[in-house]
Image (cartoon, rainbow, N blue to C red):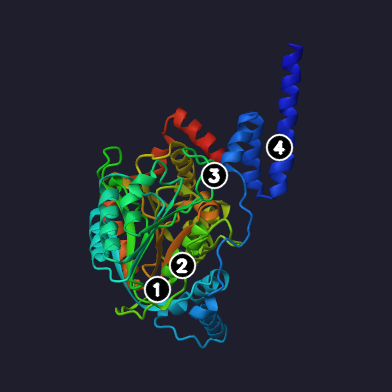
Amino acid sequence: MHIVSILLGIIILLNIVFAVVVIFRERRDATSSWAWLLVLFFIPLLGFLLYLLFGQNLSRYHMFQWEDRKKLGIETLLSKQLEQIRNDTFEFRSETERDNKQLIYMHLINNDAVLTKDNHVDLFIDGNKKFDKLLEDIENAKDHIHLQYYILKNDQLGNRLIKALTKKAQQGIKVRVLYDDLGSRGLRSSFFAELRAAEGEVEEFFPSKLRWINLRLNYRNHRKLVIIDGQIGYVGGFNVGDEYLGLDPKFGYWRDTHLRIQGPAVYAIQTRFILDWNQATHKRNISYLQEHFPKPVIKGDSSLQIVTSGPDSEWEQIKNGYIKMISTAKKTIRIQTPYFIPDASVLDALKIACLSGVDVNIMIPNKPDHPFVYWATMSYIGEMLSSGARVYIYENGFIHAKTIIVDHEISSVGTANIDVRSFKLNFEVNAFIYDTKIAQKLDEFFQNDIALSRELSLEAYHQRPRLIRFKESISRLLSPIL
């Protein structure tokens, strides 16, 4: 018993030391500090191991180098747009752009997100159609293919994609593939053997030093980007795997939203890929060559900004963009997200919108792919119902779309969920679109999805079993670190 007491005392002392040195030294926000303190004190030692896996902060050093901005003219264009908006001399193409000049300005000054005009945007909500078009674009590539996904699987779709890329590499097209080491865990080097043999290049983002285990569960590259010949850019929610084609019985039909963009916005998507690639490779850097940034051959009428965020950034830029959109809403807010775990600022903004008479609609899945995250989501959904929001549970499979539409005028589509992980811990990318036609089309999709959903009432929510309430309460406590 004496030895047990000594060991217990050592464990308690170690937990105190860990809490003081590790938590407070990193000056994380109070909410996540308390969440980690609960883990450390209620799960001694194991809690510290969990912290090592999930909780360490990423030092905010400059991971991504921008030395060639001047060469590309980005710095000059940024300065010009900022000055013109300040002086009220900026040439807005529409009232939608003018009405949202503060949002545009915020993305410019905090994220170097140039407002691009004359873009043509195609919307995809079905994985089969999206990948059929992507494979067609790959087949027609003439110079280069840059492809980046969080999840890339060795399955039917993954093999179709790699086969198509290998064929183009054999034709002399420059092919580069970047994937996240954790999101694509299980991929073996042999999966890319033929592509590499054809001079295709493959890199991992934040790879593990251990062969089978990646201990860095945070700070993952959650972006999904494809750039073809500098003329076509893809961004959105679909990863590469058979489930995204609706072939996984667990999830059924997979409902997502993805953009295919032609126009000057592709420059921003290309720049983002080059930055991510050069950070990952350290040896085969991509130069900012003219062939990567050709003059657009397709002219459209959509204006948008490509906005990125990540744990290396000072600002939670995509989250701030969401808040600004929500705060300017006068009539409607439509949100589709697989995970709804907002921080206090987003939750308050949505509540205020509800209490101000704005019609707030939120659509979430009917099944969890991560149980703790799902239960935490339901706890926040209860607050939104109490504030007057309408909540829809998508029943036609699994909804993975990350979409916000405000007043049928502006929208945001990309990779960022409504959760702390997307706001702070992952590298994300979203398109903020200032085009009423796109917003109205996305709203039309939303209305069609309502027909495939059931509305959750506040009364029904209050009737959920006690066990579910308990799970929600525990998950809610841990929500800042999920």
Amino acid at pointer 3: Arg
Q: Disc 1, disc 2: CB below 8 Å?
A: yes
Q: Is residue 364 left or right of residue 182?
A: left
Give the CA separation, mark 3 to mark 1: 32 Å
Q: Disc 2, disc 3: CB below 8 Å?
A: no
- First in sequence: mark 3 or mark 1? 3
Give the CA separation, mark 4 to mark 2: 42 Å
- First in sequence: mark 1 or mark 4? 4
- First in sequence: mark 4 or mark 3? 4
- For the residue labelled by badge 1, is the local secondary structure a helix, a strand or a loop? helix
Q: Is residue 83 above or below residue 169?
A: below
What residue is pinned by disc 1? 292
In front of the other: 147 or 232: 147
Amino acid at pointer 1: His
Amino acid at pointer 2: Ile
Image quadrant holding the N terminus, namely: top right
Amino acid at pointer 4: Phe
- For the residue labelled by badge 3, is the local secondary structure a helix, a strand or a loop? loop
Query: Given this view, does label 1 or label 4 mark the residue nearer the observer?
Result: 1
Query: Given this view, does label 1 or label 2 mark the residue nearer the observer?
Result: 2
Give the CA separation, mark 2 to mark 3: 26 Å
What residue is pinned by disc 2? 286
What residue is pinned by disc 3? 216
- For the residue labelled by badge 2, is the local secondary structure a helix, a strand or a loop? loop
Q: Is residue 43 left or right of residue 277?
A: right
Give the CA separation, mark 1 to mark 2: 9 Å
Q: Is residue 47 above or below residue 257?
A: above
What residue is pinned by disc 4? 18
